[in-house]
Image (tube, rainbow, N blue to C red):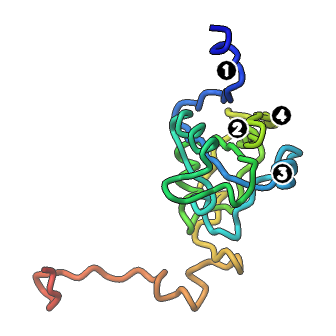
Amino acid sequence: MKFRTWLEEQSLQLPPIPGNFVRLTHFTSKQTAQSLLSGQNFSYKKQGMLSSTADAFSDNNEVLQLIQSGKTGAFSRKEFGDHVVLMDLPNTDNRIHSNVTMAPGEVSNERILGIVDTNTMQFTPNPKYNANAKPLDVPQTRGGLDRFTGQSVRQNPAFAAFATPMPAQNPATSNVDIW
């Protein structure tokens, strides 16, 4: 009985995931993890959208399983580092961060729950974490802007054909084959 109690005390305990939130995990180096704990925002600008570099979960057991195994499906995340950044985002914010046309390119530091060192299975909370932080407002995001130039997609000639609305075809009066 004492062994079981000792073993339970040694297991990693994470705070519960707030309602209508997802918990994201990102494997990284110790140096990057430390910079995030010191107040730096989590940047994913080079990846385009958050879901390209982080895995989202709604169940802490799945988060713990990923941290322990280092794998999601057949893909190993441990090759990116032995520290796991944990971020809690409202579902609406996660949708914005996962849409390449709207993604702001970084997650505010107050959304970073903390870091887990996979070597020691120690959780270090982020002192600036705030589950009640203001959700993203769509106008604050990059929506409609080219992420490299900051120019409106509608004004960029390379994207003009995609940004120009096309008139809907009426199948009754056009030669469009709708089948």
The quadrant in which residue 42 appears is bottom right
Residue depicted at 62% across the width and 59% down the height: 50
Cβ–Cβ below 8 Å for labels 3 and 4? no
Classed neighbour count for the residue bearing mark 2: other residues with Cα under 10 Å, few (<14), some (14–19), many (≥20): few
Q: From the image, tell me which residue sits under label 2.
A: 133
Residue 30's disc is 3
Estimate the x, y position of residue 170 in percent, counting from the top left.
18, 81
Circle 1: element type:
helix
Numbered tag placed on residue 7 in the rendering: 1
Label 3 or label 4, whichever comes before in sequence order = 3
Q: Residue 131 appears in which quarter of the rendering? A: top right
Give, as a three-letter code, the residue at label 1.
Answer: Leu
Mark 2 or 4, closer to the camera? 4
Disc 3 residue crowd, few under 14, some 14–19, many 20+, Cα 10 Å:
some
The reply, left or right, for residue 95 in relation to residue 126 is: left
Query: Regarding mark 3 in the picture, which secondary structure is present there?
Result: helix
Residue 90, above or below 7: below
Question: Badge 4: how crowded within 10 Å, few (<14), some, or many (20+)?
Answer: some
**Taking 5 as reference, is 93 above or below it?**
below
Of tags 2 and 1, the one toward the viewer is 1
Q: Amino acid at mark 4?
A: Pro
Q: Where does residue 88 sit, x and y in percent of width and height? A: 64, 40
Mark 1 or mark 4, earlier in chain? 1
Observer-side mark, 1 or 4, equals: 1
* Residue, disc 4: 127
In the rendered view, does 53 fall on the left or right side of 119? left
Report the side of 6 relative to 24 (left or right): right
